[in-house]
């Protein structure tokens, strides 16, 4: 993203060197989890009424963010039932363990698709 719209309505420009790598991934994970709270993205979006929970996903650097978000979910109203990762940049995790700190969270079913374009 080139910017983030803050709650007050102002824009915060993307600046990759403004935060440490651990702080960047923590921020992405927190934003993903905040968006997964029922009603956070407005009314009219389908919400599971059968207790199935929420599936989080991420592509590239969003993969580690989704993993971290699932570890933060234990202290939130979001019940993560699974993860879908597409070409996750796990080697670029920026210190998920350090960013998670005391983040608990158990294992959840995870499906990861990795493109063969990286094996050339």
Image (cartoon, helix red, strand yellow):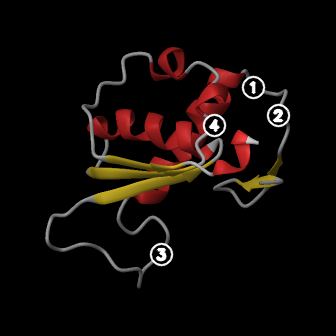
- Residue 85 appears in the picture as rendered: yes
What is the spatial separation of the Cα atoms under label 3 and label 2, in whole angstroms? Answer: 29 Å
Extreme residue toward the bottom, this view: 44
The residue at which mark 1 appears reads as 19
| x then y, percent, for residue 91 | 63, 26
Mark 2–mark 4 CB contact (< 8 Å): no
Inter-mark Cα distance, 1 to 4: 19 Å
Distance of label 4 from label 3 (alpha carbons):
30 Å
Residue toward you, 18 or 97: 97
Circles 1 and 2: CB distance less than 8 Å? yes
Q: Are marks 4 and 3 in contact (CB under 8 Å)?
A: no
Residue occupying image coordinates x 55% and y 51%: 58
Which mark is on residue 16?
A: 2
Secondary structure of residue under mark 1? loop
Numbered circle sitting on residue 42: 3
Quadrant of the rendering where the N terminus is positioned: bottom right
The earlier-in-sequence mark between 1 and 4 is 1
């Amino acid at each position: 993203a080139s910017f983030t719209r803050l709650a007050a309505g102002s824009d915060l420009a993307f600046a990759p060197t403004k935060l440490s790598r651990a702080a960047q991934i923590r921020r992405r994970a927190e934003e993903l989890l905040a968006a997964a709270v029922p009603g956070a993205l407005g009314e009219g979006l389908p919400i599971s009424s059968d207790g199935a929970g929420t599936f989080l996903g991420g592509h590239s650097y969003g993969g580690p963010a989704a993993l971290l978000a699932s570890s933060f979910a234990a202290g939130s109203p979001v019940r993560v039932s699974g993860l879908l990762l597409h070409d996750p940049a796990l080697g670029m995790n920026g210190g998920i363990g350090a960013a998670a700190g005391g983040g608990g969270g158990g294992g959840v079913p995870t499906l990861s698709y990795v493109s063969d374009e990286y094996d050339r």
